[in-house]
Amino acid sequence: MEQNLVSLLKQEKIVAIIRGIPNGSGEDTAKALAAGGVSFLEVTLNTDGALNMIHDLKGKFGSQLRIGAGTVLDLEMAKEAVQAGAEYIVSPNLDEEVLAYGLEQGVEVWPGTLTPTEIVRAYRLGASAVKVFPVGSMGVKYIKDIRGPLNHIPMMVTGGVNLDNIKEVLGYGAIAVGLGGNLVNNELIKKGDFEQITQLAAAYTRLAKEVQVHAAK
């Protein structure tokens, strides 16, 4: 299961992040993202009704979408996420208890890391991939630099990725990108403009599929 999920992530290259969307709009949002070619959907736990949303979306879209929990900060949150049916856990930080719990439960944990020390530590503790965050503040060339010595560690990049730089980020060797507001736009969702969400998802997935990876180029 573990390797299959990361292998699929390497193929699909995009994790759509639902954060703070209006209550009751989860199903329409998931449907719009799936229609645009997205396969990985992360619901952050600081979204109202996140656990119910994870449970419901898993029931309705389990065959189409891989549903995970994001912004998982501690062990208690990790337990709630797994109980709700999350297939993977994403954090902005490296919490060793969360990582150990995920390994014990057979649930992927992709912890948030930024420095080489954090990235290597997470990988040694058993993370099959790490989330490098926030890359937007560092500049996307940070990925190129860090993958020079650490190109054996699968890295997902979150923060500051958009239509203009997604190919650059993936070209530097990131296995995937996490896309929040630049894809899952809450203003569009409030207006009910799910067609635009689908079009954005299709644009991102098309660009991602075009990338030929030259790690540490």
Image: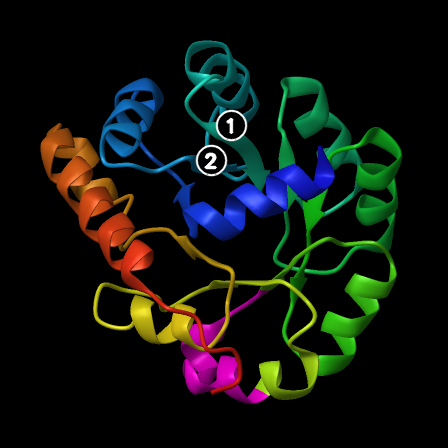
Quarter of the image with the N terminus in it: top right
Secondary element at tag 1: helix
- In the rendered view, tell whether residue 146 sits above or below residue 184: below
Please name the residue that numbered disc 1 is placed on.
Answer: 50
Q: Which residue: 47% across, 35% down?
A: 47
**Marker disc for residue 61:** none
Q: Which residues are magenta?
A: 132-145
Q: Are circles 1 and 2 on residues that touch, CB within 8 Å?
A: yes
Q: Position of residue 173 (x, y in %)?
A: 50, 72
- In the rendered view, tell whether residue 13 sits above or below residue 199: below
Q: Which residue: 63% across, 30% down?
A: 87
Residue 16 quadrant: top left
Please name the residue that numbered disc 2 is placed on.
Answer: 47
Residue 47 on the magenta span:
no
- What residue type is disc 2 on? Thr
**Closer-to-camera residue (74/199):** 199
For label 2, the crowd category at 10 Å Cα-Cα, with few meaning under 14, some 14 to 19 and many 20 or more, is some
- What residue type is disc 1 on? Ala
Residue 142 on the magenta span:
yes
Q: Which residue: 66% across, 28% down?
A: 81
Secondary element at tag 2: loop
For label 1, the crowd category at 10 Å Cα-Cα, with few meaning under 14, some 14 to 19 and many 20 or more, is many
Q: Is residue 189 left or right of residue 98?
A: left
Q: How is the image coloured?
A: rainbow
Residue 32 quadrant: top left
Q: Which residue: 28% across, 49% down?
A: 205
Q: Position of residue 101 (x, y in %)?
A: 85, 38
- Mainly helix, strand or loop, the magenta region? helix
Residue 11 in sight: yes
